[in-house]
Image (tube, helix red, strand yellow):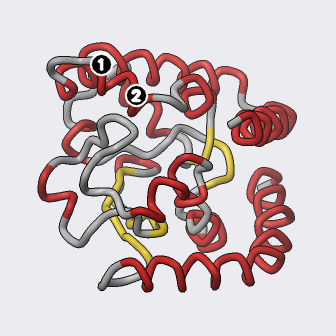
Amino acid sequence: MLKRLFDLMITIPVLVLLLPFFLIIAVLIKAGSNGPVFYKQVRVGLNNRDFKIFKFRTMHLNADKEGLLTVGGRDPRVLPIGYFLRKYKLDELPQLLNVLIGSMSLVGPRPEVRKYVDLYSIEQQKVLIVKPGITDYASIEYSEENDLLALSSDPEKTYIEDIMPAKLLLNQKYIDEISLLTDFKIILRTAAKIISH
């Protein structure tokens, strides 16, 4: 209950403050590509249940049909404005709407697509006992994930065998340390990481 209150106390005023910024981003996306402003994707959340996550659309329409992973800094599927939004994690801002409706928290394990969750071991599935979040330890540690995948001859294999297990260990670390103080520290570290870019 306190975590939910903490989420709303931050999310509601931030959404109000960011509304003009949202409108500017929406105009830029529409000016650079036909299609919706928001991209909705099915992810796996609390108790292994599917939900739709909101993002600003950074790719051409139906780009996800060519693969779920984004590799490198210059994926040809990404819109010109999309590079900027992704670099500064601005494409993630609409997930504040997910927090508002209760399908996500500000801090928690990043929600994964079903394809990869189906590969989780029983131990790894424990990350699904908490609500997914916009940021967490793994988001900070792997903020350059796309660049790491670009160095691999088989990005899919690298993600499944190396990156995903490492991120899940960090998710478990968060669950072991979960508290409002931990959430606050992660939010500050995330902001510092974004600013450092």
Q: Residue at x 55, y 46 (%)?
A: 87
Label 1 is placed on what type of residue?
Leu
Q: Which one is in front, 192 or 30?
A: 30
* Label 2 with label 1: CB-CB less than 8 Å: yes
Which residue has dot 1 on it?
Answer: 151
Measure how far apart labels 2 and 1 are at the Cα level. 7 Å
The vertical placement of 31 against 17, above or below, is below
Question: Residue 181 at what x, y percent from top left?
Answer: 87, 34
Disc 2 element:
helix
**Neighbour class for label 2 at 10 Å: few (<14), some, many (≥20)?**
some
Number of marks in the rendered image: 2
Q: Which one is in front, 128 or 63?
A: 63
Among the 4 quarters of the image, the one containing residue 193: top right
Which residue has dot 2 on it?
Answer: 147
Q: Residue at x 45, y 60 (%)?
A: 82
**Neighbour class for label 1 at 10 Å: few (<14), some, many (≥20)?**
few
Label 2 is placed on what type of residue?
Asp
